[in-house]
C-alpha cells in the first residue's frame, strides 16, 4: 500500500513536470518577450531618472554660471534656451541687475524680451509689465497709456491686481480725489489675498484721510 502511494505520488509529480514543460515550451516566446519588456521598462525608467537628474544638474550649473558672468563681467545670456523657466529666471535676474545699475534701457529690453517670448504666462507677463511701469510711472491720470496698463494689471484675475490698484490709489491721493481714495482703499483692504506689508501701507492712507 505504501509502495503504491509512493508510485502514484512519483507519477503525479512527473505529470506535473511534464505539463509544466509543455506549457513553458508552448509559451516560451511570449514569456521571453514579456521578460524583455519588463527589463526594458525598468531600464527605461532608470535611464529617465538618470537623464532627468543630469539635465537638472546641467541647468543648475548653467544658471550659476550665467549669474556669475553677469555679476562679475556684466555679461548677459544671448543664446536660446529650451527650459522656459530657466530662461525667464535669467532674464529677470538681468533686468534687476540693470535696474540697480540705473541702466533703464537694458532693464526695459530684458522685461520686454520676457513679455514677447513668454507673455503667454500671465504671471510673467504681468510682472514684467508692472516692473516696466514702476521704472516709469504715470505722473497723472491723463497719462492714458500708463493708466491703461494699470487697468489691465488690476483686472479681477490679475496676479498683481492689488499692487496695480495701489498705484492707481497713489494717483488719486496726488489730486486728493476723496471718493476714489475711499473706494480703492476699501477695495484693496477687503481682498483676502492682501499681504501684511501692503495692508500696513493702505491702513496708513486710511488713517491720514480718516476713512475709518
Image (cartoon, grey):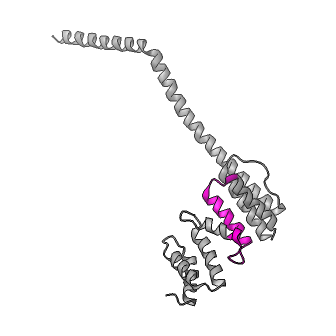
Q: Quadrant of residue 69?
A: bottom right
Numbered circles on residues, count: 0
Residue depicted at x 42% and y 12%? 25
Q: Which x, y percent locates residue 106?
A: 80, 63
Q: Which x, y percent locates residue 143?
A: 71, 73
Depth check, front residue: 136 or 4: 136
Depth check, front residue: 135 or 76: 135
Q: Which x, y percent locates residue 67?
A: 75, 59
Depth check, front residue: 12 or 10: 12
The answer to whether residue 8 is left or right of residue 136 is left
* Residue 103 against residue 82 in the figure, above or below: below
Quarter of the image that includes the N terminus: top left
Whether the magenta-drawn stretch holds residue 171 is answered as no
* Residue 151 against residue 202 in the figure, above or below: above
The answer to whether residue 176 is left or right of residue 80 is left
Depth check, front residue: 161 or 28: 161
Residue depicted at x 77% and y 64%? 107
* Residue 95 against residue 61 in the figure, above or below: below
Residue at the far right in the pictured view: 73
Q: Which x, y percent locates residue 212?
A: 49, 87
Whether the magenta-drawn stretch holds residue 140 is answered as yes
Q: Quadrant of residue 158?
A: bottom right
Q: What is the magenta range?
A: 117-146
Residue depicted at x 48% and y 71%? 192
Amino acid at each position: 500500500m505504501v509502495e503504491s502511494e509512493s508510485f502514484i505520488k512519483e507519477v503525479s509529480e512527473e505529470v506535473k513536470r511534464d505539463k509544466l514543460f509543455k506549457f513553458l515550451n508552448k509559451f516560451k516566446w511570449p514569456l521571453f518577450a514579456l521578460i524583455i519588456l519588463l527589463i526594458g521598462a525598468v531600464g527605461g525608467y532608470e535611464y529617465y531618472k538618470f537623464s532627468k537628474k543630469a539635465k537638472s544638474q546641467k541647468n543648475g550649473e548653467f544658471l550659476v554660471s550665467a549669474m556669475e558672468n553677469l555679476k562679475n563681467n556684466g555679461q548677459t545670456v544671448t543664446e536660446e534656451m529650451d527650459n522656459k523657466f530657466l530662461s525667464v529666471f535669467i532674464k529677470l535676474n538681468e533686468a534687476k541687475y540693470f535696474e540697480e545699475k540705473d541702466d533703464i534701457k537694458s532693464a526695459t529690453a530684458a522685461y520686454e524680451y520676457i513679455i514677447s517670448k513668454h507673455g503667454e504666462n500671465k504671471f510673467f507677463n504681468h510682472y514684467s509689465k508692472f516692473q516696466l511701469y514702476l521704472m516709469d510711472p504715470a505722473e497723472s491720470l491723463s497719462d492714458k497709456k500708463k493708466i491703461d496698463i494699470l487697468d489691465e494689471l488690476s483686472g479681477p484675475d490679475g496676479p498683481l491686481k492689488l499692487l496695480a490698484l495701489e498705484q492707481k490709489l497713489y494717483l488719486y491721493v496726488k489730486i486728493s480725489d476723496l471718493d476714489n481714495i475711499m473706494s480703492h482703499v476699501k477695495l484693496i483692504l477687503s481682498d483676502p489675498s492682501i499681504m501684511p506689508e501692503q495692508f500696513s501701507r493702505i491702513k496708513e492712507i486710511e488713517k491720514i484721510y480718516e476713512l475709518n
